[in-house]
Amino acid sequence: MRVFVTGASGWVGSAVVPELIGAGHEVLGLARSDTSAAAITAAGAEVLRGDLDDLDALKAGATDCDAVIHLAFIHDFSRFDASVQTDARAIETLAAALEGSGKPLVVTGGTTAVPGRVATEHDTSAPGSPGAGRDANTKAALDSATRGVRPSVVRLPRTVHGEGDGGFIAQLVTAARGKGVSGYVGDGTSRWPAVHVRDAARLYRLALEQALAGSVLHAVADEGVPVREIAETIGRHLGLPTAPVPAEDFGFLGRILAVDQPASSALTRELLDWRPSGPGLVEDLDKGHYFR
C-alpha cells in the first residue's frame, strides 16, 4: 500500500516509516520543515510539505494514498485544548478524504487511567479529564466506519521508550540532574504503562494491514512500572539519591506522575497476534543511552 503518514519524522513516526517500508509499503510523509523533510527522505519515503493546520495538504495526502496513519499531535501542554481542536480538524479532514473508499485510517490516542484497576481497550477517559478531548477525537475517527472508512485507534502508553527518546523519561533524567535527586511523587507506587518504540511501530503496521473497522488497540508491553522503580533506576545510573518530590516541582509532569495508570494489551495481542519483543522500560534504562 501507499501510506500517508502524519508525524512521519517524529519520535514514533521515525520508527513507523521504516517498519512500513520494510514490509513493502510506500510512504508519503507530511513535513512542516526542511529538517523534517530531510529526515523523511533519508528514511526512504516521499515528502508532502504541510502541517496539521494545512487542511488542503492533509486532504491531498489522504486522497493520493491507499491508507493513512495519523501520528502528528502538537505537544504544547500550555495550549492543550487548542492542540486537541487542531487534531479534531485534522481527523475530520482525513476521514472525509477517505469517505466511501474502504481505506484504513489509523489514528493515535493514549491509554487512560481507571481508578482501582488496569485499563483495557474498552475503557475511555472520564469526562473532564485531560484525556477526554483526545478520546472524543478518536471516537470521531471510529465513527467514520459508517461513512465507508476502515478506522482503528492505536493508544500509546505514557512512555514510548528507546534510544533517541526525548519524552517523559528523558525529562525525568534532566530533572534529576538539575535537582541532584531522582524524584517521584507520593509513595512512588503509581504505575506507568510503557512500550518500546519498535514494538509500537509494528502495532501501527498490523493495524493498517489487519485491524477491523472500529478496533481500539493498546500499544502496551509493560502494564505498569512503579514510578519509584523508574526513579531508583535513574538515580542509580546518575549516582544520585532517590526521594519523594512535591508534584509541583515537576510542573505538568507532576500531575502525570501522581496518577496510577496501568493498562493492559491483552485484547490487542489476541486480535492481531502482536507480541512485544523489545526491552522493557527498566531494561532499556539499564542500557545507558538515556544518560549519555
Image (cartoon, helix red, strand yellow):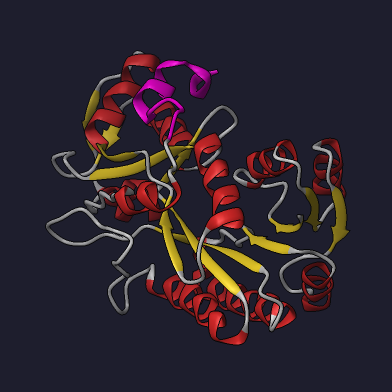
Q: How many marks?
A: 0
Looking at the image, which residue is at 41% across and 36% down? 172
Residue 250 horizontal/vertical position (percent): 36, 46
Q: Is residue 219 above or below residue 98?
A: above
Q: Quadrant of residue 173?
A: top left
Residue 153 horizontal/vertical position (percent): 49, 63
Q: Is residue 152 above or below residue 220?
A: below
Residue 107 horizontal/vertical position (percent): 56, 64
Q: Is residue 128 magenta?
A: no
Towards the viewer: 67 or 248: 67
Q: Quadrant of residue 242?
A: top left
Q: Is residue 282 magenta?
A: yes
Q: Residue furthest bottom?
A: 147
Task: Give, as a single range, the part of the protein colored magenta.
Answer: 276-292
- The N terminus sits in image quarter: bottom right
Q: Is residue 179 above or below residue 70?
A: above
Q: Quadrant of residue 52?
A: bottom right
Looking at the image, which residue is at 68% across and 55% down? 7
Towards the viewer: 182 or 39: 39
- Left or right for 239, reference 26: left
Is residue 251 visible to us here?
A: no
- Left or right for 92, reference 188: right
- Left or right for 90, reference 259: right
